[in-house]
Image (cartoon, helix red, strand yellow):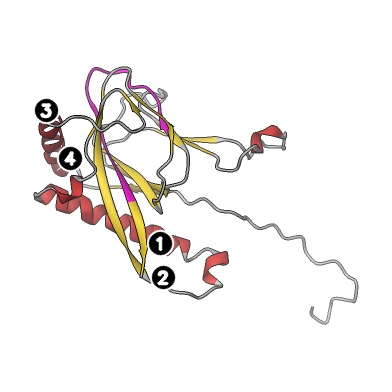
Amino acid sequence: MNNSQRDGESQPFQVSQIFPTLLGQLRIADHDAWDRRLKTRILERQASTSSENYANAGGWHSPSDLLDLPGEEFDWLRNTIASGVNAMVQSTFRLPEVSSRNQAPRGAFQIVAWANVSRRGHYHRLHNHPGSAWSGCYYLTGSNDSKSLAGSLELYDPRPFTEMVDVPGTPYGQRLVIRPEAGLMIFFPGWLYHFVHPVDSDEPRISIAFNAIWKRA
């Protein structure tokens, strides 16, 4: 309290944000050449490998060893994902509730990735990624209709029952829609529930999903 404040005088009203949920978005420049190489490799593998079904309703879900495959395109993908994960960690440590602890993390991430190829009518059911600190997606193909939900990723507000009470402005219980865009890579907590709307095109919708699993030292 400064000298101008008297005993019992009210303090300025303060509002803080609590329980933050971080979302990272990276739009990659000069991605076209890498995308072409990745598409070719993924479609070749689809032709010779059965789908590993998890949350996908139709379409093809590759094995989760995409980053173990040889080739400069997979080296580029691995490095790009790792750079994004590092940015998410740095953002986390700038949060007030984290920076005040002044504790450096000790450990390393294991990153795994898989490809998804979807065509008309295929979608992904509501799910999350257990065990993953950060999860995400890289789009090799996009949507030509900025108003369509086809192939879009939808993220749920993680706080249960928040939509049960009316609040001015309706800030709670909302969903965030991310439309596919070639060259866009996104990052979100692995526990965050999400799903993908049905694709409405006969052309393949190709994306690469990944998990970053934290291993403490």
> What residue did someone put label 1 on?
89
Q: Secondary structure at mark 1?
A: helix
Position of residue 57 measured from the top left corner of the image (x, y, whole percent): 34, 24
Which of 86 and 60 lies nearest the eye of the viewer?
60
In the picture as drawn, the residue positioned furthest to the bottom comes out as: 3
Q: Nearer the viewer, mark 4 or mark 1?
A: 1
> What residue did someone put label 2 on?
105
**Disc 4 or 1, which lies upstream in sequence?**
4
User: Quadrant of residue 197 in the image?
Assistant: top left
> In the rendered view of the protein, which quadrant contains the N terminus?
bottom right
| Amino acid on which disc 2 is placed | Pro
The answer to whether residue 14 is above or below residue 103 is above
Position of residue 107 measured from the top left corner of the image (x, y, whole percent): 35, 68
* Residue 24 seen anywhere in this rendered image of the structure: yes
**Disc 1 or 3, which lies upstream in sequence?**
3
Task: Tell me, for residue 47, which label it has, or none.
Answer: 3
What's the distance in space between the residues labelled 2 and 1, CA to CA? 9 Å
